Amino acid sequence: MVIPTPHRRRNPLHRGLPPLPHTIPARRSANLCVSLPVAIVKVIRSWASKKFMTGCVILFPIAITFYVTWWFIQFVDGIFSPIYYVLGINTFGFGFVTSIGFIFLVGVFMSSWLGSSLLSLGEFIIKKLPVMSYIYAASKQISSAISPGEEGSQAFKEVAIIRHPHDGEYAIGFITSTVMLRKNEGSEELCCVYVPTNHLYLGDMVLVNSKDVMKPDISVREGIEIVISGGMSIPETLTMVDFETTFPRSRKFVVPRV
């Protein structure tokens, strides 16, 4: 006697048929349970990376400032610290205070007639040396450019914007002097504009007609900050001071068509 076996219903997926209606919500809920944690992880990761980069952007200049300041304090403190070490005083900071006081006294002494005379004598000796004369002259020009006294007027007089190196391109430089160019047609006043790199002590010296020089309303120190920072500290709007130029007359910086 043969006992009939119960008929087994095949899975519709095996026959290429669509799944049964009662299985669709279960599969959707399963996919949702899998994709929801992945989406949450991506959102958290994106949020964390943005906040981390924001923290780096904020802390980086602060860290650099403190590091350079600490290095400067240690460097200056190390000038007179050996003297205190011989005297048996090992307190940190005495050398720094002594160095600052020494620099202040040097400034006071060099402002006198005797100090300026000794400085002139020392400069005369240094200028006779073959290599040191160039180094001293370049460093003195840079230091004189940012000095608060009258020496600053002997170096960088004003900030200038000129066409350089091609038409349609502009460069920020510093007016160092003016010169009269005599020709058969007449005389022409030229401005000697120094266009530095971000190293400040390297750059190009350009002679530009004084009428073609634009003078923004920024100080020499602000111009130096713009050059050193690679233009990141430049104001959003540059206002021109009184000048005579062939560019469009406007108080705002308008780039002329070329």
Image: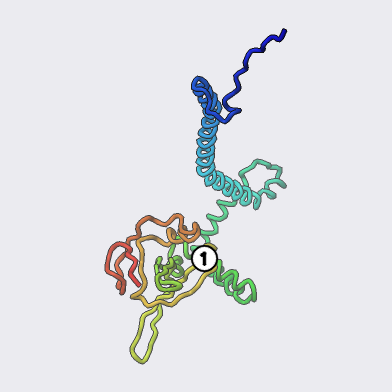
* Position above or below: 6 against 153: above
Q: Residue at x 54, y 47 (%)?
A: 65
Residue flagged by tag 1: what amino acid is it?
Answer: Thr
Q: Residue at x 52, y 61 (%)?
A: 109
Whether residue 112 sits left or right of residue 79 in the image: it is left
Whether residue 180 sits left or right of residue 38 in the image: it is left
* Position above or below: 202 against 183: above
Say whether residue 114 is visible.
no
Q: Residue at x 59, y 52 (%)?
A: 99
Q: Position of residue 142 (x, y in %)?
A: 51, 65
Whether residue 235 sits left or right of residue 39 in the image: it is left
* Position above or below: 5 against 165: above
Q: Which residue is mark 1?
A: 197
Question: Which quadrant is home to the N terminus?
Answer: top right
- Quarter of the image where one finds residue 5: top right
User: Which element carries disc 1, helix, strand or loop?
Assistant: loop
Which of 117/192 is in front?
192
Colour scheme of the rendered structure: rainbow
- Quarter of the image where one finds residue 158: bottom left
- Outermost front residue: 1
Q: Position of residue 137 (x, y in %)?
A: 56, 71
Q: Position of residue 164 (x, y in %)?
A: 44, 72
Q: Residue at x 37, y 55 (%)?
A: 236
The total of numbered circles placed on residues is 1
Q: Position of residue 210 (x, y in %)?
A: 36, 76
Which of 212/19 is in front?
19
* Mark 1 surroundings within 10 Å by alpha-carbon count, few (fewer than 14), some (14 through 19), many (20 or more): some
- Outermost bottom residue: 184
Say whether residue 215 is visible.
yes
Question: Which quadrant is home to the C terminus?
Answer: bottom left
Which of 97/114 is in front?
97
